[in-house]
Amino acid sequence: MDTLFAICATYQVDDGHAAGFMLMRKEPDGGARPWPILIARKGNHFFGFENACPHQGSRLDTVPGEFMDEDGNFITCGNHHAQFDLDTGHCFIGPCQGQALTPIKLIIDDGDVCLSGIDLAEEDGLDIPEPDEVPEVQITSD
Ligand code: FES
């Protein structure tokens, strides 16, 4: 089985939102190149794509806060308001209509969103702090 590489914990991507991550991917010549990806969430489903628009190759999250539509149903390009289907990455409106984002297979393992079968150049590129506190548990009685 391929090694799993944890990108983030599931709780770090809110329902109806997407988060971008910058990874480093190994090249066949031994070098490495930046590899921006995005992880979107709808309920308990997670969707991974390369964060590169099919029409310009640029990242979709260049405008902060506009990674998904306000109902959390579609990935959006903050610059051009193109919209992409969560399941397929297919662009149904915008300058790249008819094209699609490149999907990335995600595996949910023990509360983490993971990649598999991708040769990454480094494994410490995640810039997300661990939470300092465990959620408080309250015990109540009637
Ligand atoms: S970069 Fe392609 S729709 Fe915005």
Image: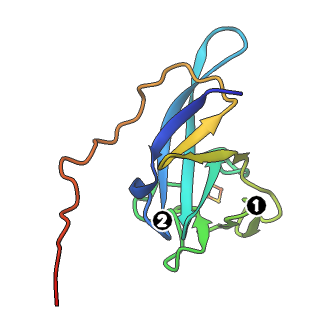
State the image quarter where residue 40 is shown: bottom right
* Local SS, label 1: loop
Gap in angstroms between the C-alphas marked 2 and 1: 16 Å
State the image quarter where residue 64 is shown: bottom left
Judge the density around disc 1: few (<14), some (14-19), many (≥20) Cα neighbours within 10 Å: some
Read off the residue under disc 2: 17
Q: Which label belongs to residue 116?
A: none
The answer to whether residue 74 shows anywhere in this view is yes
Q: Quadrant of the C terminus?
A: bottom left
Q: Quadrant of the N terminus?
A: top right
Judge the density around disc 2: few (<14), some (14-19), many (≥20) Cα neighbours within 10 Å: many
Q: Are marks 2 and 1 in contact (CB under 8 Å)?
A: no
Q: Position of residue 100 (x, y in %)?
A: 77, 56
Q: Position of residue 56 (x, y in %)?
A: 68, 48
Q: Residue at x 22, y 60 (%)?
A: 135
Q: Which label belongs to residue 88?
A: 1
The residue most toward the right is 98
Q: Quadrant of ligand 1?
A: bottom right
The residue most toward the top is 30
